Image: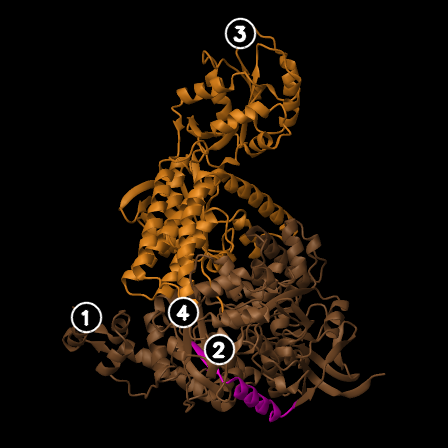
Amino acid sequence: MREQMLSDTIAAISTAVGESGIAVIRVSGPEAIASVEKVFRSKTKLTEADSHTVHYGFIIDPEKGEKLEEVLVSLFRAPRSFTTEDVVEISTHGGIISVKRVMDLLLEQRDIRLAEPGEFTKRAFLNGRIDLSQAEAVIDLIRSKSDRAFSVALKQVEGALSRKIGELRHTLVETLAHIEVNIDYPEHDVESMTTEFIKQKCSLVMQGIDSLLKTASQGKILREGITTAIVGRPNVGKSSLLNALARENKAIVTDIPGTTRDVIEEFVTINNIPLKLLDTAGIRETIDVVEKIGVERSKAAVDEADLILLVLNNAEELHEDEILLLKQLSGRPVIVILNKIDLPQQLDRSEVNRYFPEEAIVELSAKTEEGLDHLEGAISQLFFGGELESGDLTYVSNVRHIALLKRAKQSLQDAYEAADAGIPIDIMQIDVRLAWEQLGEVVGDSAPDALIDQIFSQFCLGK
Amino acid sequence: MGYYGGDFDVIVVGAGHAGCESALAAARMGSKTLMITINLDMVAFMPCNPSIGGPAKGHVVREIDALGGEMGRNIDKTFIQMRMLNTGKGPAVHALRAQADKFSYQHTMKETLESQPNLTLRQGMVEDLIVEDDKCVGVITMAGTEYRAKAVVLTTGTYLRGKIIMGELMYESGPNNQQPSVQLSHNLKKLGFELVRFKTGTPPRVNKNTVDFSQMEIQPGDENPKFFSYETKSSDNEQLPCWLTYTSAETHDIINANLQRAPMFSGVIEGTGPRYCPSIEDKIVRFSDKPKHQVFLEPEGKSTSEYYVQGLSTSMPEDVQVQIVRSVPGLQNAEIMRNGYAIEYDAIVPTQLWPTLETKRIAGLFTAGQINGTSGYEEAAAQGIMAGINAVRKIQGKEPVILDRSQGYIGVLIDDLVTKGTNEPYRLLTSRAEYRLLLRHDNADLRLTPIGHEIGLISEERYQVFLDKKQKVENEIIRLKETKVRPSEINELLTSIGSAPIQDGSNLLTILRRPEVGYAHIDSFSPSEAGLDDEMKEQVEIQIKYAGYIEKQLLHVERLQKMERKKLPDNINYEVIQGLAIEARQKLAKIRPISIGQASRISGVTPADISILLVYLEHYNRVTAAGGPSIG
């Protein structure tokens, strides 16, 4: 069962992810100081330091003993902090890589978990730090952040990842059902579950998690980035643009073995900003139906995108579908690309200006790559201007998945070791069940009754 | 029209396992109690298997006893077989199971009821409730008698619009051909209760003189039986064995050839049956690749030749039942004394109840047992005692007693029912408990006896015995911790039991943590002077050996309890709380959880909804404290 905790220790990145100068990770809760202390090396001990002090030092991977990041750590002791709990803020160099390394390490500490959307504010409110008149604003914040995080998370676990985790969970739930049947129906003629068998299953699932984590760290599956949709009518040059961006920026094309087309994503990094171009199959399909924007799929793709690149053909007059698109996309983070500037201009630019300001329009030729740098500049502009902040939700969701995968693996490791130590099966089961639930959280599936359903579908029981 | 029958504090309708606990609890807590039932010969009757206990169920019986209930004592007096199950597994899942002498179980319970001060037994059919201002203030019987009370507990079992089905034969009836209760069901519906139709079943009984036990495997009881009640120290009950045999290929052929006559498949049964208690025809259809199924022969008592045929629950027509029974090895010449049958009955949707088992719709009306959608004697008794306790607490103007999921299987059971509801007759399983390691058979007294004492169901004398046990266990743990041992002292013992010798000094507690070391080893090495009995030794061993896991679970429990302590006011209007998702809003409005903890267990209520509720609650509390209006 997933618990809502009121006073455990939480962490989150509290600045927008990007190439800003500094990124801040905030940790709040009773274990905040002690937990950060475990991974921080400095002249002063944090646990002994005064409130409202700043400490220079390094984040250290305690297992390997290596320095990860040079950081500044600010300390706020309860109740004199934003949440009124002990709060530690770690300022790292900006950029997604640095902050992610520190965050991943923090979440490996058993006492820290990733904050729920809006949780710092919630705590500040519940602890009386925020004025009563702000209650509705706090509620709105929680709602909107949660909904957005939910849709992002859901999108991320579609396809191959979800299937893979589903398989691992199935192995676990079958094992669990078997253990449970032995316990609840000791006299039934069901074969007894052996420690050896449980160990085997734990190993199997741990290997599965390992391979997921490996792909994750290689940036293949859980790759973070700003979800970017390239939209436009057929033959305006979307594929050429994609290829040009990919070529220029050394795109990584990922392909998860065993799947035909599900998650083929293109990643490009522009001025250190990671972009996730929607999976190619999806993009192509989106292209085909973009004229009918009401069609569910293309609409969803556009809705979920953090950034939309709308491609228009500079060498043709605006089509009525395109005017419709311009209308519908106005107000969203969009860069309008006038492609094919190597050909004579036919497009009426003032029509575009009716919906988008000049700085959102970029002229280029995907074919000759002339003007590609303008596009890259425009993306940076939007990003550092803070207009693409939602991109960090994708990132946060990745962090959550990785942390949960690691915890699930740890739980299985615990079960495995318990088996070796001669702990009874019903106690070993505690950790196996925990792993099953943690994997369930990754894919948003936490129905506790699923185990009981499994027991009765797998075994013939009754009097 | 009405004839006035008397005034009581509490009226309990029904005298099954829920009714007995309810009435006894109420009377023992000082309430003037009336127990009214259709047939006084059916007090504490076991209409299905003649056994009590097993995993989760046995735990519940211990909990009932720890609270001061009767079921444990009663079965300890009347068992004809006692077995501890799961002894090869961890302490959390050890479970006691007894075969009961059905008749002495009933008679013994009836005697207890009859000799209980404050308790009146009356035969009668309750047909209606007296409801004034949405409060239940009494009942009316078929004879027109009006009994008045401050609270009423309904424990109607499978009697509500009961209908027995056997092949093509179908007739209105309670269990075992008792008179069903029809009018009460209609009246509950009239009062606005949502009812569901459930189904359960029972196998045939055969005459033991026609059974060839030589073709079966004997299943004896334990040589040194343990007991359900903490009060029972010994017993000289003679034990009878059970017998194991299997269905044959012929059994399966007979059933397959007659499926069109099985009510489950011909469509005449409308009620939902439990998955965990399928009929033999159900098992053969759903698990068609399983070549044979177990069949246990269980004695129904010492003074009868009837044997219960566990595993052959069926609602096939009588002629097919005869064939089925005779196709089982050892039963070739068996004579059926009673047919198996399916029974359909009405239950109320349990999400209409508060966690006290009082209905939300009508104050002072409590329900317990199968009427709440459960199955099983133990589950019924557990609800019975809680409903009885809370009816009295309400009358006395005291805080209700609500057990949470970490305090007992009783808490798990009631929380599941009132928070999630159930779409089949609900049976407890140990896997329904999140904190199984804490909810052990051995520590039910540690968990619940202080509560039983506080509410007046546990005598001062018994409480002192309990405190003494608790103290001795704690002292012994301290002693083990403080007893230092040198390698030279203990290595011989360790080596002799295949445990690695120690290099440096240690203490006995650390040594006992080793899986291969038992308390018996320590006891032989350094006996305690305090005179610990076996129960205490078991406690010491478990608390030390599994301390790591226990602490881990306790940490979770602490968080759970924090959420349970955040009470939600009864008058919240979920419709106006901004930000709640629509599904959450509807579910919350329907269930009306009493705490954030309960709210978080409602399916469809997400963590974001809980966060919003917390913010709302904080706002509500601060504004209420200030006397201002609420938001929303």
Question: Range of the magenta residues?
Answer: B96-119
Q: Nearer the viewer, residue B598 or B187?
A: B187
Q: Is residue A162 above or below residue B127?
A: above
Residue tagged by mark 4? A186
Q: Residues within 10 Å of mark 2 (few under 14, many from 20)?
A: many
Mark 1 Cα within 10 Å, few/some/many (few <14, many 20+)? few
Q: Which chain is brown?
A: B
Name the colour assigned to chain A in the rendering: orange
The label on residue B334 is: 2
Name the chain under label 3.
A
Check disc 1 and give the amino acid type.
Gly
The earlier-in-sequence mark between 3 and 4 is: 4
CA separation in Å, label 2 and label 3: 97 Å
- The residue that disc 3 covers is A343
A455, B168: nearer the viewer: B168
Q: Mark 2 and mark 4: span between their CA atoms?
A: 28 Å
Residue A340, position as x, y percentages in the image = 52, 11
Q: Is residue B608 above or below residue B119?
A: above
Residue at mark 3 shares a chain with residue at mark 4: yes
In the figure, residue B590 lies in which quadrant? bottom right
Q: CA distance from mark 1 to mark 4?
A: 29 Å
How far apart are labels 2 and 1 at the CA level? 53 Å
Q: Amino acid at mark 3?
A: Leu
SS for dot 3: loop
Q: Pick the residue in front: B94 or A247.
A: B94
- Residue B194 x/y as whole percent: 70, 64
Q: Is residue B118 magenta?
A: yes
Of tags 2 and 3, which is closer to the observer?
Answer: 2
Residue B447 is at least partly visible in this image: no
Which amino acid type corresponds to the residue marked 4 in the rendered image?
A: Pro
Q: Which mark is residue B498?
A: 1
Indicate the secondary structure of the residue bearing disc 2. loop
